[in-house]
Image (spheres, rainbow, N blue to C red):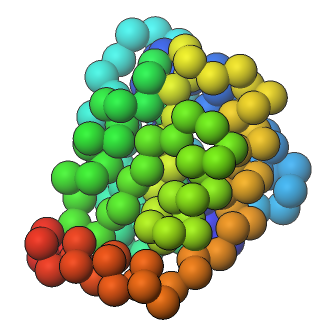
Amino acid sequence: MTIAIASDHAGFELKVKIKTYLEQTGLSVEDFGTFKADSTDYPDYGVLAARAVANKKADRGILVCGTGIGMSIVANKIKGIRAALCTSKETAELSRRHNDANVLTLGGRILDHHVALEMVEIWLKTPFEGDRHLRRVNKIHELTGC
């Protein structure tokens, strides 16, 4: 599995920890930046990772900014992306189980990095349930033309 990852300056530290974790678990990671903690604009990096997922160059994406909100908004502008801003292990699990989220967004200034890593692990391992949830995801695709 290949994971596209990106952050702005506020999410940089957490992104580095997540990238290290992913690589230690044997996953392939494509890092779209930023590559330092200097102030930057999250759309510049989030869009690159989201497009990689949408274009099937990565299986899933993880985006980190200060709150996760900006990255979520950016990613959801890309056709085919179902980005979920998650703030707990439960929301990470349900974003996969019920929404088949293909991008996880996290808040680097909000989450403890240990909790964030647990969330990433859960999000990566949780399957999509399909069934009635597939019907709902398909309705989202119809609305957005995904």
Task: Identify the residue shown where x is 64% and y is 57%.
Answer: 93
Q: Is residue 1 left or right of residue 109?
A: right
Q: Looking at the picture, does residue 30 appear above or below residue 142?
A: above
Q: Looking at the picture, does residue 18 appear above or below residue 132?
A: above
* Residue 63 point in image, percent of width and height: 48, 41
**Which residue in the rendered view is the most extreme toward the front?**
132
Q: Which of 8 and 89 is in front in this view?
A: 89
* Residue 42 point in image, percent of width and height: 34, 28
**Which residue in the rendered view is the most extreme toward the bottom?**
131
Q: Nearer the viewer, residue 49 or 124?
A: 124
Q: Is residue 62 visible?
A: no
Q: Nearer the viewer, residue 138 or 3?
A: 138
* Residue 48 point in image, percent of width and height: 35, 49
**Which residue in the rendered view is the most extreme toward the top?**
38
Q: Looking at the picture, does residue 99 appear above or below residue 46?
A: below
Q: Can residue 142 be seen in this view?
A: yes
Task: Identify the residue shown where x is 62% and y is 66%.
Answer: 2
Q: In which quarter of the image is the C terminus?
A: bottom left
Instruction: Identify the image quadrant of residue 126.
Output: bottom right
Q: How many marks do you count on the picture?
A: 0
Task: Identify the residue shown where x is 27% and y is 34%.
Answer: 43
Q: Is residue 20 left or right of residue 24?
A: left
Q: Nearer the viewer, residue 5 or 75?
A: 75
* Residue 114 point in image, percent of width and height: 80, 29
Instruction: Identify the image quadrant of residue 115.
Output: top right
Q: In which quarter of the image is the N terminus?
A: bottom right
Task: Identify the residue shown where x is 69% and y is 34%.
Answer: 116
Q: Is residue 129 left or right of residue 102?
A: right
